[in-house]
Amino acid sequence: MKNVFFGLMVALMLAMSGCGEATIGVAVDIPIAFINPPAITFHTYTKDTATEHIYGSINFDAPDSDIDSMTVVVYNPRGVELSRVTTYPTNLSGATRGTIPFSIDYFTFPSESNPYTFSIYLTDFNGNTSNQAVDTFRVP
């Protein structure tokens, strides 16, 4: 009996090990998490020389409606970071698109002949970051 069982096992192994092109497979559904980072779709700003501020806003799309923060970074003309401000908007719960205002206080920035650069990006609750909105301004 053991010899018959052993013979059947050997025959089965030979049949499955490459004699022909038979393929044995198992289909398994694997859930795929879609990453939908936020996107900045438009930005605008004005320079208020009386108060020495930049006032602006960004428009955004957030397919997952999960905007966590907005970061504004300012660089001097030589590319050195001067300022980084991260804000956490509280009125965007469930928003898939909208507008977020921002401001930059350049009162303490020295006058330069070349422009300063600012960059704005959004971060969602999963840590995904948006594209950057980049622009320049001059002081004074």
Image (tube, rainbow, N blue to C red):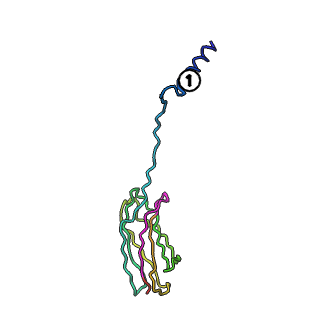
Callout count: 1
Q: Secondary structure at mark 1?
A: helix
Lateral position of residue 9 relative to residue 58, left or right: right
User: Does the segment drawn in magenta span residue 34?
Assistant: no
First to last magenta residue range: 123-137
Instruction: Name the spot of residue 67 as percent of width and height, x first.
Output: 43, 62
Quadrant location of the N terminus in the rendered image: top right
- Dot 1 corresponds to which residue? 14
Viewer-nearest residue: 78 or 69: 78
Quadrant location of the C terminus in the rendered image: bottom left
Lateral position of residue 104 relative to residue 18, left or right: left
Using the image, determine if residue 113 lies above or below residue 120.
Answer: below
Instruction: Name the spot of residue 64 as percent of width and height, x first.
Output: 41, 56
Q: Amino acid at mark 1?
A: Leu
User: Does the segment drawn in magenta span residue 129?
Assistant: yes
Residue occupying image coordinates x 45% and y 39%: 29
Specify few, some or many for label 1: CA neighbours under 10 Å numbering under 14, 14-19, or 20 or more.
few
Residue occupying image coordinates x 46% and y 44%: 31
Instruction: Name the spot of residue 105 as percent of width and height, x first.
Output: 46, 80
